Image: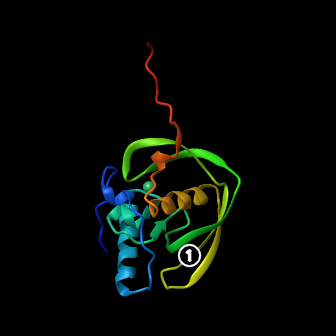
């Protein structure tokens, strides 16, 4: 178990495309466990491998039902639209409204190398789309349609 350093916006690694994982190895299991530790230690609900400087298509999430690791995740179906507030461990101190699909279907490999299909909606669908964007070098700030209103001082 290890908590890794989360890289921040401005680091070029966050802007690169990640490579597909070819096989499940011991090293990969360790990386996934470290990513889960890192996510919890940062109070996050999701973490993508590029955020710890690893350009491989791996994400971990916890939408409240325990940790879930997905390898080579791909969105195969997306429906509807939902606008809600997002933030990112790599963009500290910033939140904003982002439009996402409301319901998605994702195919991925689990940490044992088994292919799985998962349907998600609401918060879970939002986290998945956010983390899968990281694998393409996309940050939520690229998609913000409106900054979360700050409390305004009277002028
Ligand atoms: Zn993020």
Q: Secondary structure at mark 1?
A: strand
Q: Quadrant of residue 35?
A: bottom left
Task: Please give the count of numbered marks on the rendered protein.
Answer: 1
Q: Report the quarter where the N terminus lies.
A: bottom left
| Closer-to-camera residue (81/111) | 81
Task: List x then y, in percent, for residue 81.
Answer: 67, 50
The quarter of the rendering in which ligand 1 is drawn is bottom left
In the image, 8: left or right of 45?
Answer: left
- Colour pattern: rainbow
Q: Quadrant of residue 40?
A: bottom left
Task: List x then y, in percent, for residue 24.
Answer: 43, 85
Residue 16, above or below 1: above
Q: Quadrant of residue 77?
A: bottom right
**Mark 1 Cα shell of 10 Å, populated few (<14), some (14-19), many (≥20):** many
The residue drawn where x is 50% and y is 74% is 72
Residue 65, above or below 152: below
Which residue corresponds to mark 1?
108
Task: List x then y, in percent, for residue 119.
Answer: 66, 68
The residue drawn where x is 58% and y is 45% is 84
Residue at the far top in the pictured view? 155
Task: List x then y, in percent, for residue 108.
Answer: 56, 75
Residue 86, above or below 21: above
Q: Report the quarter where the C terminus lies.
A: top left
In the image, 52: left or right of 75?
Answer: left
| Closer-to-camera residue (148/98) | 98
The residue drawn where x is 45% and y is 15% is 154
Residue 67, above or below 43: below
The residue drawn where x is 60% and y is 79% is 116
């Amino acid at each position: 178990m290890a908590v890794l350093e989360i890289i921040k916006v401005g680091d070029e690694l966050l802007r690169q495309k990640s490579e597909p994982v070819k096989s499940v190895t011991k090293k990969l299991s360790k990386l996934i466990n470290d990513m889960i530790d890192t996510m919890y230690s940062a109070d996050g609900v999701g973490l993508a491998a590029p955020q710890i400087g690893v350009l491989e298509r791996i994400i971990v999430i916890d939408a409240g039902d325990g940790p879930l690791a997905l390898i080579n995740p791909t969105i195969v179906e997306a429906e509807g639209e939902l606008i809600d507030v997002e933030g990112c461990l790599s963009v500290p101190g910033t939140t904003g409204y982002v439009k996402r699909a409301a319901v998605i279907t994702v195919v991925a490999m689990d940490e044992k190398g088994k292919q799985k299909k998962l349907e998600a909606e609401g918060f879970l669908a939002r986290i998945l789309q956010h983390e899968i964007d990281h694998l393409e070098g996309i940050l939520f700030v690229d998609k913000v349609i409106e900054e979360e209103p700050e409390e305004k001082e009277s002028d």
